[in-house]
Amino acid sequence: MKITYETQRLSLRFFMLMLVLFGMQVGYGLLLAAQQVDPTILAGTLNFNVARASHLTLGILWIVCGFIGGTFFAAPLLAKREIAMVPLAKFLFFAIIGLVIWNLSTQFLAMKGIAGWWMGQPWLQNGLEFLEGGRVFGLVLLVGFIILASIVLRTFPPVKQWNEIHWGLGIGITALVFVWIFGLFYVSRLDLQEYFRWYVVHYWVEGVWEVIHISLIGVLIVFMFKASVRAVGFAVFWGISLVWLSGLIGNAHHYFWVGTPEFWQFWGSFFSALEPVPLVFCFWHIYLDAHANKRPLTNAPAFYFILGSTVLELVGAGILGFVMTFALTNAWSHGTWITAGHGHLALFGTFGMLGIGAAYWAIPSMRNTPDFDQRLGKLGFWFLFAGMLGMALSFAFGGMVQAYVMRVLGLEWSSGDVSPAMGVFKMTLPVFGFLFAAGAAIVIYDLATLGAHRSPALTTPAATGWRRPLTGFEAGIWLGFMCIFGLVITFSLLAFNLPSVRVGGDPTLPYLLGGIGYLGLFGVTLGFVVRFTASLGARLRVESPELPTPDLAIDT
Amino acid sequence: MSCTTGDKSCETPRRRGALSVLVLMAAIFLTLSVFSFLDSRGQVTPDQISYKDYSADDGKRIFQAYNCMGCHTIVGNGAYLGPDLTKEYNHTGPAWLEAFLPSAGSFPTAAAVRTHLISPEQLKLSGVTSFEEYLEKYPGAAERLDRRAGKVSHMPNLQFREGEVAKLIAFLKYTAAMNNEGWPPAIQAGSLETRVAKVHGTSLVAAANASVSASPEPVSASGGATAEQGEKLVTDYGCVACHATDTTQKVGPGWGDLFGSSVPLADGTTVKADQAYLAESIRNPDAQVVKGYPAGVMPPYKDLIKQEELDAMVAYLVSLSKAGK
């Protein structure tokens, strides 16, 4: 575990910036959870909408920092040469800091109703969900993306020598630029605005981030398990192809109720129901790659986070996305906390955990401390993982109540009807939020000081019972239960259409199915990750020469 | 699968195959997109809708400037804290929104909504001829006046500038006119009482109804106009939604120590706040606008309240200052 190229060290500053922004986002998240309970907290000073805008933008920016860190760490190995245009890469770092400060300040203007309208565009802040930054922010970020894409493409070898990993990362980083452009125009028609807003949000997540995610996971799998670049490249190719083939028309699930025609309900329901397919594929591949050779984990925190990323991608993005992707279920989940549960688990799980996992792999190499103490990293992972599952559960249950009170009973008085009904789950949200925040603090501290503490002598527990090797059959059973509980959740949302619920006003059946489905799904998810990591932890530590990392730039 | 790993000759056809399917999908998607926004679909556009002097597009810009989506949802997208605003205009009508938005920190009373409906222009905009007809046409307004009037809302008071409230209403009028393919789903779960009972239990509903019927009609002050009557009137009319009883500024100026002070006006002159000034500020607020406050936010009360009520309110305002005591 040593770095090969000096410019791989460029990734360190982006990982550190990622941790700072992550910590800030968690802080805003805790404030938002508190304001959900009592909206008068900081009212007039830092209103809910300002805090939420900052929470979302910070989330996007720290995930991008994680991508940049991972890409800069991998790019020299993929290119077999140093990173090109180093001064621009350094500039990019300061540009992101400037953007963060600018954006956090300008969001406060929303409390005064100042958007900075000039030439028909809002230059200071935009007031649209996920695209809260004004045009100044948007254009500077566009320049940042262009710089990033230029650095990566100039570093890579000529296109003729690209293998699947080059293609994945190259396309992903370049597409960041093009998709962002759709968010840089003021659109007067609400239906057309929402149409283009989802170009950015959906195609970023489903078309671009997912592609970068699959490619970087591929790279990390090669690092960790010395897996064959050809086999990983094959997985990357099919992963990306399936993501795009299902996700391109799958965007239609955002066009059910925004003023676009009814035919989108067919296309959206059908194609986005296929969106979990590539995620099942990736899930299965990480099982295969982790079991290709039976060597013990050299860097457990890094693998934990990569595993968490792949599992939560399937559960948070795939299954929780699937349950509300049908027009008949979406009519009830749309505009409620149910979607927030999906969003939190999918975004942090898939992309956040990837960034942290990449940092855990890269930082010990750069500091040349392969024998760093891994205990804090593992502890931080469990806090983050359990905290986020708990938050998603609070969102999901709160969302079921919200859907019932607001959509079935038609009572939308937030302080009189909706908030009191959701009360319990508005309280459990910050409780799990604190668990998550504790995990964030542990991980940030651990990564910042990584290498200061040496690992104690490790004993390998016996590989029996809960720790026995995980077979493909058993992994398949876990996966099967996840899918079954996902179906139960789908039926719970479908049950809102029954006359007994809609007309009779009796929520028992959706609540019951939702309770079984969500608790079952999250329980199986937690159990599977515990089982998977326990079985890897019991692999025998035999002294054997370290395998060289395979040649990433190999022409397949 | 013959083309699994390592066979170079398989790579190119596989990439091409995936790409061609992708192009086909993109073609389907773009075709559907074009059909979504053709004029023949008949979807309403912002240039077709206006309210007072403002277009729906003016309102959309204000909607974005205040980041309304950061708490509310619109067509279901947004922040899930406040209610969905898509059909709000159809539900509560423009007069309720006019009464609510300037002082969003609390819900308007019936008197506050009635004040707006005195103007023939507002009656015409609302498409009704009387307050009673308004409540029938906009059941959401009736429900809110019944259950929420005078209560604190979760929304902060925003210091809207002149015209911004009307612009926002223009935007909400547009979204309410949109065809959203039936979303949000129509409410089929029975009467309001039944539905409220599902959330709060029947006992609470009964208690609330009892307290509503027990509360007397707004006092029409017979006999001498006293400050105590005035204090009750400013609550009934919802004045305290915008005005603090001390010197702090809410939506309008605070009342504390107002009587007897010198008030700077928007036209640069200064006026002494005597009884006549206070009475005129209630009857016809736009005649003498205080410096730093936009005109047109407070509706004129001249046709709504009786002389005795006015006297009682002025007596109450006088009692809030040292000079008056």
Image (tube, coloured by chain):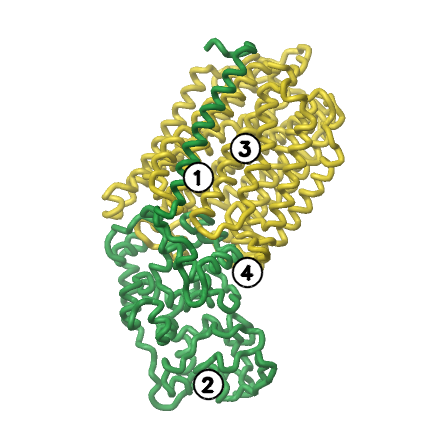
Q: Residues within 10 Å of mark 1 (few under 14, many from 20)?
A: many
Of the residues shown, which amino acid type is indicated by label 1? Leu
Residue ID for mark 3:
A208
Q: Is residue B43 left or right of residue A537?
A: left
Reading the chain from its start, which is encountered first: label 4 or label 3?
4
Which of the two marks, 3 or 2, is nearer to us in this view? 3
Residue depicted at 43% across the width and 15% down the height: A473
Please tell me how crowded label 3 is: few (under 14), some (14-19), or many (20+) other residues with Cα within 10 Å.
many
First reached walking from the N terminus: tag 3 or tag 1: 3
Q: Are marks 2 and 4 in contact (CB under 8 Å)?
A: no
Foreground mark, 1 or 2, reads: 2
Chain letter behind tag 2: B
Q: Secondary structure at mark 1?
A: helix
- Tell which tag, 3 or 1, sits nearer the viewer: 3
Which chain letter goes with mark 3? A
Give residue A393's mark: 1
Residue A353 appears in view: yes
Alpha carbon distance from label 4 to label 1: 35 Å
- Packing grade of label 4 (10 A; few <14, some 14-19, many >=20) is many
Q: Are marks 4 and 3 on the same chain?
A: yes
Callout 4: chain: A
What's the distance in space between the residues labelled 2 and 4, CA to CA?
32 Å
Alpha carbon distance from label 3 to label 2: 64 Å
A154 above or below A347? above
Q: Position of residue A431 (x, y in %)?
A: 50, 44
Q: Nearer the viewer, mark 4 or mark 1?
A: 4
Which chain is green in the rendering? B
Percent across and percent down for residue A494 are 31, 38
Q: Nearer the viewer, residue A543 or B83?
A: B83
At label 4, the amino acid type is Gly
Residue at image mark 2: B279
